[in-house]
Image (tube, coloured by chain):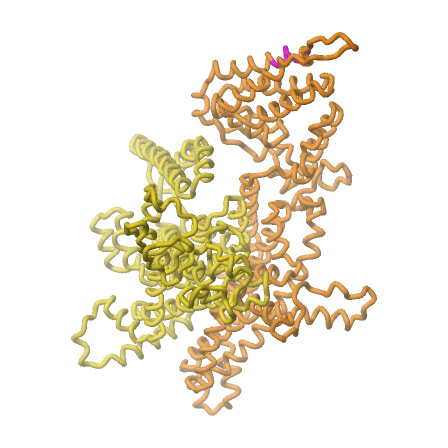
Amino acid sequence: MSANNENIEKSTESAVQVEPAHKAAEDQSYSAIVKRQFRKNKPAVWSLRFIILIVIIGLSADFLANEKPLMCKYEGSTYFPVFREYIVDLGGSWPKELSSIVDWKTTEFDYAIWAPIPYGQSETDFANANYASPLDDQNVKSRRWWHWLGTDEIGRDVMSGMIHGTRIAMMVGVVSMSIASIIGIFMGAMAGYFGDEKLKTSWANILLFFVSLPFAFFYGFQIRSYSIGEAFANSLFSALFQIFIGIIIFTVFIFIGQLIAKGLNKALNLKANTNVPIDIIVSRSIEILISVPRLLLIMSIVAIAKPSIMLVMVIIGATSWTGIARFTRGELLRVRNLEYIEAAQSLGYSEWRTIFRHAIPNSLAPVLIAIAFGVAGAILTESFLSFLGIGVEAEVATWGKLLSLARKNFSAWWLALAPGFAIFITVTIYNLMGEGLTDALDPRLKQ
Amino acid sequence: MFKYILTRILYFIPTLLIITLLTFLLSQAAPGDPVETRLQGGQGAQGGGMSEKQAGEQAYIDMSKKLGLDLPPFYFSLGSIAEPKDLYKIFRKKERENLARLINKYGNWDKIEPYYESIKAFEVTLYDIERDTNSYTDLKILKEGINNLLNNYEEGKVNNTLANMEQAMNTMSKVRVDSNTIIERNYFESSIPAFTAMRDNYLAIKANPSVWKTNIPSIKWIGTGNQYHVWLFGNKPWFSKSKDPSLKGGFIRGDFGESYLDGRPVSSIIKDALPITMSLNIISVLIAYSLSVWLGVFLSKRKDSKLDRVLSIVLFILYSLPVFWVATIFIVYLTTNEYGMDWFPTYGLFSNDLSDDATFWEVAKDGGAHVILPILAMTYGSFTYITRQMRGSMLAVLKQDYIRTAVAKGLPDNKVTWKHAFRNSLIPVITMFASLFPVMISGSVVIEVIFSIPGMGRVGYEAVLARNYPVLFTVLIFSAVLTMIGILIADILYSVADPRISFTKKK
């Protein structure tokens, strides 16, 4: 560790020396320094631009690749089928004239504007089934309908799958890292701020915690286990909603227990003199989570449930918070000894207010590094799981799933190259982002 | 030091306990009935007579006992006061789950139990019914009805089934007694009392619900006679040599149970798989460390040269290459004649056509050709990672004052590099071993699955897909132990490499 710190100090020293004197008038706030540092790192800046591009592709995937026309005139009236599909998904209905259309490609429109890639992610083009190569002749009307990245065994357009896979990759990053950040920052902050000695409570609180635990679990989850199970069979969102309600009930019961304990403390004049070794608890759970092979653990959880890409994201998030927790813990260990925290404490702010309003916001910057690398890891994990065919719905195209098709037919070289390259590029840019952030956030570490 | 290692090993215990609990919870949540999987369709005796039915039932019970599934799951159970303590004695998982749903719906076990028993009693009376072409259809309806009743709890479905069954019960068949007399007769007359009792019992459940009971929690203590305890610690007395198959040694005595699929002992599966994964990983770690430490030092001494810059970019790209993509590319391009590069065998660890009396060299050559690509795919990731770290840590050390001193007093360059700088820069690289090890174990899942190498990763993957929990448990626990040992070794090496670090003193 010592070598590392010295390394960091050296590099910040040199960074300070590079700053010319006439720039001293520049904004010297922390975020401004970080921004300047980050801008100097060309690869990181480029990867940030690339990430924005991925987000744009992911958000507009339906407009970039769709088997329906973006706009069409049919029997005298104009429609926007792709937009309409969103309304249908939200519970609306197709206009009567369009609802009878089964195959959009063979329908005679007065005119139609198609998406740049006029194929859906699960649409099968029978004329080009059985691995149509992008370089050989394809059975299409014109270049407009060309399969730019070929097709798979049943004639699905690979380019369309790649575009829709971008959305999945983007969502994997966002969903899993949001979950991981919430758990990781909370756990790390608790461990770092309180350590092993600072969180004191009375035995009544601990006793009532353990007494209220079975009640909380019973009313929160056990009693509702059948409705949670049915929600899982319906959709993941309803399941998450049910679980969310369960967590609320659970918390309410724990809270009631603590209220009673508070009363007891007052009545019996109990002192908060029992240590809760929160740091040991958190560190040990991190150790346990690291010891279990994560891939097998995620696989065994996902294999039980109905295939759902959202579930995969949630589970990746729930198992990959350890890095973030470690970073936050380290930061909080440093921050908790700073003067302004002491000031907050001496002003009589509650511990929770000090942690959430003052300590955590000031230690979030380094956590970004862990998140950047975490996104890369989450995308890798997800694509490997879909590569194995675990946890993906049949109609969803992901990069990993496309790559797995390459193992079925070795002559389809485009299936081995395109999706793998997309995964590689995405992982690389997130890694570059992580490195760029590490460098840019350095000045902070010299304090 | 010894004391430190001992405490660390003691720390293994809670970690392992939590992992066993976690996997046990998973196995409890998994759908499907392992006993039926093992028996391959436990209800196969459906169409037969009484004795076959009983034989089927007995086989089911025996298999449950053999797999240790005839016990309550855990030391205690948290449930409502409506749930009876001995529900686990209903052997068939589907029936048990259906009864639990009924309890959840009505809350009156004292009425549900007679209902369940009367279904079984009614089923027994059906075996006395004469079977011929007249009774065949109705008998079939009744048997399907019983199956429906045992597996459904919704009021509508049960009522429907009961109505269908009643109709079948009351069918009057025309039976030709001799050439000119035809009488009408009901085949099911003898079963009618049992059927009425069953229907009345169901009505009684609906008439006297006590749903409030399902809202009151109760913790029931079960004791050590539970699935988890028996699986982990066994129920065979220590040092007994009893061969009774229902007595188990338990996980900690090396009895890992048997595969749900084919009944093969898990220990023998692991015995085949573990050495493969271990040797692949060890070879890969050795290659990665020996090459990358050297390369890291080499690059750090030529900092900012053209070679250094080019190699740094190459290493970064290699680092970001997903293993399963590289492995797929290897397989697609290098193992078949499709692209004219049929240089390596595609799958497995040895060729199938390797004769039994092959000489050692033939075996070694064949195995070697098979493992080159997997090892390459396993190694490049950790190789690039370590090289980058080694280069960085070496650069940091080379800036130190004591290195300047060493150079200033005229020590030869080699001596400065290897004696002064190298040893100090090795420390962070050694600690990396701890974080590298779990990654490598996960990585071997990827490699083994893609290259079809029968190691732990592949065994675990197949166990996940088949919900073969005894195997999955064992793989998870073995991997966890390996990981923890790896981390421990890294910590010990750490103190060996850096004498300033001592684990015995307290901060």
Q: Is residue B265 visible?
A: yes
Name the foreground residue: B503 vs A90.
A90
User: What range of the chain is rendered magenta?
Assistant: B190-195
Q: For residue A342, which quarter of the picture?
A: bottom left
Give residue A21's position: percent from left, percent from top: 20, 81
Tell me the chief SS of the magenta region: helix
The spot of residue A236 in percent (x, y) is: 42, 43
From the viewer's perspective, is residue A260 above or below residue B496?
above
Is residue A9 highlighted in magenta? Answer: no
Q: Give the quadrant of the C terminus of chain A.
A: bottom left
Nearer the observer, B40 or B140: B140
- Residue at the location (47% across, 60% down)? A157
List the single residue furthest toward the left.
Answer: A25
Residue lying at 28% horizontally and 52% vertically, measured from the top left:
A78
Residue drawn where x is 35% and y is 47% of the image: A98
The image quadrant that residue A172 belongs to is bottom left
Residue B392 location in percent, x, y? 44, 76
Is A132 or B475 nearer to us in this picture?
A132
| Residue B427 is at least partly visible in this image | no
Q: Which chain is orange?
A: B
Residue B233 vs residue A314: left or right? Answer: right
Q: Is B36 displayed left or right of B99 in the figure? A: right
Of all chains in the rendering, the one displayed in yellow is A
Whether residue B262 is situated above or below residue B332 in the rendered picture: above
Total numbered circles: 0
Question: Is the N terminus of chain A in the top left, top right, bottom left or bottom right quadrant?
Answer: bottom left
Estimate the x, y position of residue A436 in percent, counting from the top left. Answer: 35, 70
